[in-house]
Image (cartoon, coloured by chain):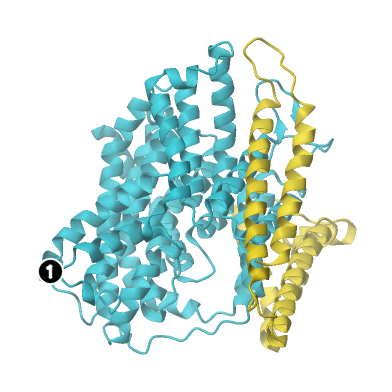
Chain colours: A cyan, B yellow
Amino acid sequence: MVEHYLTAFAAIFHPQNLLALTLGGLWGLMAGALPGISTSMGVVLLLPFTYAMSPLTAFTILVAAYCGGITGGSITSILFGIPGEPSSVPTVIEGHSLAKQGRAAYALWVFLLCSIGGGLFSVFVMMAATPIIANFALRFGPPEYFALTMLGLSVVSGLSGGSVLKGLISCMLGIFLATIGTDGITGLERFTFGTTILLGGISFITAMVGLLAVSEIFIEAEEPFKEYKGSANYRGMKEEMPKFSEFKENWPTLTKSPIIGTIVGALPGAGATIAAFLAYGEAARTSKHPEKFGNGAVEGLMAAESANNASTGGSMTILLSLGIPGSNTTAMLIAAFMIHGLQPGPLLLTQRPDIIYGIFVAMLMANVFLLGLTIVGIRMFLQLNRLPYSVFSAAIMILCVIGAFGLNNNMDDLYLMLAFGLIGYYMRKYGFPIAPAVLALVLGDLAELSLRRSLLLSLGDPLILVSRPLSAILLAAAVFSIVYPLFKKPKMLQGL
Amino acid sequence: MKKDEIVANFVIIAFFVFMLYDSFKLHKIQRFGDVGSGFWPILALSAAIILSIALLISNLKKYQGRKKQPSGEASTSPAAEIDLKNRRKKFVLSAICLLGYILIMPYIGFILATIVYVFAFILALEERRNLVLALSPFLLTALIVIVFAKFIGMPLPRGVDFFAAFSRFIY
């Protein structure tokens, strides 16, 4: 293992990968800081740049953008009171209150140090847990994989915000879309309607670009011009650096929040937003000064920021060890793995340790780099908010077109992208969450193949799915995660 | 609850029912233990139909409940209606611009199609500053071509005839 880490460090410290870390981090911070561009959109827009890169450089730039996106969302939250990401809403409540009190630089330091601390904690957990979980997952057979995908999809549908019913319909749509194309077992064409466009199935990237990015641009296009005003209270990061004693006073929050963030991040569909809200709620519940919450409570800011960044490591652990994406952004990373001919999951750790350990080190270094990049680049990100959204969205749309076209150099993919953009637009308009559809599209194929292989193994007996203990537990958990939110939604998650 | 949401529910159900009908044609068991190519889509689409009907019933109940209330949903103000129309117009124009971009790109090539698209798209988004309208299509296209065609070497569409010759001149 030590030699894998040494090789990975040597690879990441190659100038090309250091440049990828810097550019990915900057892009992620920018995407996170700009309202209208989510982290997942930032990552999907980077995909076309990675087509020609080596796999390690590609993942270095993508994970740096992922970590940067989660961090960057809080910059505009503190200074303008505009959450760059949904996970930054608690940061708006506390961080922007501090900024309004003339303590913007202080709030930025707290956010930055807690974000990086939370991110680093989760990376260490990821480094320790991934090999253990992957080793355990090597014993999984088709029934366990089927149960695992069902658990993933059910949690995504239940926790993706809004109505559970709409989440489940979105999930079923994704599962259906994953069946389009040639059947992997019988070779039969399904739902192609005689066209060649759909013969190879729907490409994840085309669908994701359409559902996530194009639909978001359509939604933003409807809005009138936005004028962002800078925070008058921000002068520079040099002022008001917090004292160590302030962190020492809040050690219970600083210990609990990254743990909450990492665990919640590992749950499919939960992600940074729920992690930040849960940690914030927990901090408010156990605080000695709950009356300060809502009026610039430093403890609340620390909790939310430690937890949302810690979710990245949790999400990546499940992706790298089991090959199950926990969020839209990790679903993009699955697509990136496939572009480079790799299949994420337990076998990848033994087949390509250079990639897995390289990703560990890249995430570690990304968090370290983000500290410097945020301090140096904060003024630049603030200036970007003054760019006219019309030009910016045109640039994003062109990147979407290049991303969808560049995969197969096929114009038909662009029509599919537009179709998915329209589907995504109407889904957003009518309150259907996009995440379940995207994750079901990615996991649907694995779920179907696992189910059919299980039934082939048992000669058609469906009891194989519940007769194996692990599979039975996972399926029971899947049923619970669908049924529970129908009857009781945790107070903290209401309205998400 | 708006009527259009209920209409959308019907459209969703009709889509899933149509696909379910199509998936029954796939349901052939070819070997012992195999459930066939149609099994999984039938399962997913049946679940989707049941869930969509449940959503429709829930929406209809909400709609009826609001209709019964005397104070009901207040009719939208003229200003709100104009805003809604404007929003729809901008969305439709954005989608048309993208469709046009995709349609003309194979014929006139990436460069010219992008210049036209950026100009039309930002105009559709109500950008009226002359400098932005005049410069951004060219600057943005130049930047994209330098990065993707020159630096990464991506084979972007070149167009046909004269346009292909023009594209080859640049990348």
Bin the neighbour count of mark 1 within 10 Å (Cα to Cα): few under 14, some 14-19, many 20 and up. Answer: few
Relative to A170, is B6 on the left or the right? right
Q: Is residue A227 above or below residue A324?
A: below
Q: Nearer the viewer, residue A417 or B118?
A: A417
Residue A417 locus on image (x, y percent): 70, 53
**Quarter of the image where the N terminus of chain A is located:** top left
Residue drawn 54% across the image and 59% down it: A41
Determine the secondary structure under disc 1: helix
Q: Is residue A367 above or below residue A134?
A: below
Is residue A13 visible in the rendered image? The answer is no
Q: Which residue is mark 1?
A: A244
Q: Quadrant of residue A400?
A: bottom right
Q: Amino acid at mark 1?
A: Phe
| Letter of the chain that mark 1 sits on in the rendering | A
Residue A470 locus on image (x, y percent): 38, 24
Q: Nearer the viewer, residue B158 or A464?
A: A464
Is residue A441 visible in the rendered image? The answer is yes
Q: Nearer the viewer, residue A11 or B73?
A: B73
Residue drawn 66% across the image and 64% down it: B63
Residue A245 locus on image (x, y percent): 10, 70
Q: Is residue B128 above or below residue A449?
A: below
Q: Going by the picture, which residue comes out furthest to the right?
A: B161
Relative to A299, is A496 on the left or the right? right
Q: How many marks?
A: 1
Relative to A106, is B49 on the left or the right? right
Q: Is residue B52 above or below residue B104?
A: above
Q: Quadrant of residue A377?
A: bottom left
Residue A158 locus on image (x, y percent): 48, 48
